[in-house]
Amino acid sequence: MIDATTLWTAVYIVMLAAFTGYVVISRVPVILHTPLMSGSNFIHGIVLVGAMVALGLATTPLEQAIGFVAVVLGAANVTGGYVVTERILQMFDRSGKKQKEGGLK
Amino acid sequence: MIDISWVIDPVYIVTIFFFIVGMQRMSHPLTARSGIVWAGAAMVIATLVTFLTPSLNNLALIAIAIVIGGGFGYIAAKRVAMTDMPQMIALYNGMGGGAAAGISAVALLGVTTEATGSLAVIGGLIGAISFSGSIVAFMKLQGWMRPRPITFTGQQLVNMAVFALAAIAGILVILQPSWVPLPVAAFLPLFFVLALGFGLLMTLPIGGADMPVVISMYNAFTGLAVALDGFSFATPNYAMVVAGIIVGAAGSLLTVQMAKAMNRSISNVFFGAFGAAEEKGVQIQGSMKSIEADDVAVLLAYADKVVVAPGYGMAVAQAQQKVKELTDLLESRGIAVKFAIHPVAGRMPGHMNVLLAEAGVSYDRLFDRDEVNPEFPGTDVVLVIGANDTVNPAAHRQGSPLFGMPILDVEQAKNVIVLKRGQGKGFAGIENDLFYRDNTRMLYGDAQETVAKLVQSLKKL
């Protein structure tokens, strides 16, 4: 069983984290919704560390197989999420835009 | 060897701090780009420090899996065209959900208490739904599956039954009662099959037009699943808990904002089978009248005020560069040009902004629906480039499936030119009244070529 201290600590953390997520996104212009969705998609890539621990502590072949797949998926979430967000945000970058225009001429 | 695993928690705290700073920066246009770099740096150190976890085995397997998954994610994301970004977000989000489901599965195969087991079951349920649902969303947007809603009679009953069975299977996984005539080892696979099935069934009836809302919701789901899985370990992984909850909360708010922009409630998105039903008994008056590029060029040349309303068609045709050229040309002739951006034009909120920014159109040219709508009556020409549902006046007519959706009131302008590939319907699968209006002319063809033609004709005038 989880003891009471751990439980209430967890509740505090969850409450503050939920509030943080809410505040960070509440006053965002519509144009940034897609990059932010993509960015938060990258951030839940933290699932990778959990998958690493799950695979690292796995003992049976079945656990290892599932853990392996979880790490593969988590790692793809991380790198893919990063690159997609980076590419979307690149367009908001002024210097990058100039380079791009120069390249086309 | 010296045990330095104590660094894990401090590093995770720094990671979370960087994540929050990163998201904060991503929420302002000027700092947005650096935001992802902050978050990315945090992810790298969090991953590295996780290798220090005490009694971690299978290190080689972990490294191989990271290389395979990371390599795939990196290459696929680099190669894909800008227009396909929405489905890539869906795909990577699904993978995150799948990883969360996998963590739950491993946790439940091992030793859990009732508390950690329950959280692992709920995390696994949400993760699995997010996985199969996101994959369906990806396939629909990628065109590997019919984008139209897939419906059958009794669908909602079947869906509810599958969900209920998944929940019951989840309870069996935790309690493992001996009176159920099934081997204990069967509960877990049964649970995951049902959860995956529910994600699939839940997404099938959703049409392509609603996909941004759905992807955003599954994004929040994955965040929540990750947070719950953070509790499935013997000692909670607070990096997962905090990051997951932040994404869950931010993602939920984003989902509500997007749904609001389309004037659709979340339940409507999931149970409305938008676009499946044809409106009956309404005959649209008038006929579609086509026009040639040269004539449009003349119209534009003698206009004082022009508004461009882009949509997904512009993205598909990659016409943004030509559109920018056209607007520059018009402006050099002293014609005022504005862009009317519907919040859900394209496949993602901000999709149009991103494409136009890529082409070098500055932000102060882009106007929200609320800002630009009062201006249409005084506008000489509206160019609708590959937009359909977002300019459909049927949204003002009671009984239309689109009724109530806020639209760009382009039909109030003096002339409306619709650039369109063919005579097909929009993503919502609904006839567009606008095309039959007296002040509307259809300019058929690939948007990029058509706009290029407009530029040429205009230069000659």
Image: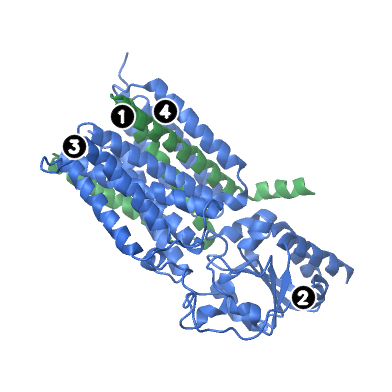
Q: Residues within 10 Å of mark 1 (few under 14, many from 20)?
A: many
> What percent of the width, then of the height, locates residue B265?
39, 69
Q: Which three-letter amino acid code belongs to the residue tagged 3?
A: Val
Residues under labels 4 and 2: Cα distance? 61 Å
**Chain identifier, colour green:** A
Say yes or no: labels 3 and 4 on the same chain.
yes
Pointer 4 residue: B48
Q: Which residue is mark 2?
A: B291
Q: CA distance from mark 3 to mark 4?
A: 37 Å
Q: In the rendered structure, which amino acid carries the disc numbered 2? A: Ile
Q: Are marks 4 and 2 on the same chain?
A: yes
Judging depth in this view, the residue of B55 and B174 nearest the camera is B174
Eye-nearest disc, 1 or 4:
1
Mark earlier in primary sequence (4, 2): 4
At label 4, the amino acid type is Leu
Q: What is the secondary structure assignment of the residue under circle 3?
A: helix
Q: Contact (CB < 8 A) between labels 4 and 2?
A: no
Q: Could you say where residue B61 lies in the image, as x and y percent from the top left?
A: 40, 23
Q: How many marks?
A: 4
Q: Which chain is blue?
A: B
User: In the rendered view, how is the structure colored?
Assistant: by chain
Q: For the residues marked 3 and 1, what is the alpha-carbon distance in whole angstroms? A: 17 Å
Residue located beneath label 3 in the image:
B184
Estimate the x, y position of residue B271 in percent, counting from the top left.
37, 66
Q: Residue at x 50, y 62 (%)?
A: B148
Q: Are marks 1 and 4 in contact (CB under 8 Å)?
A: no
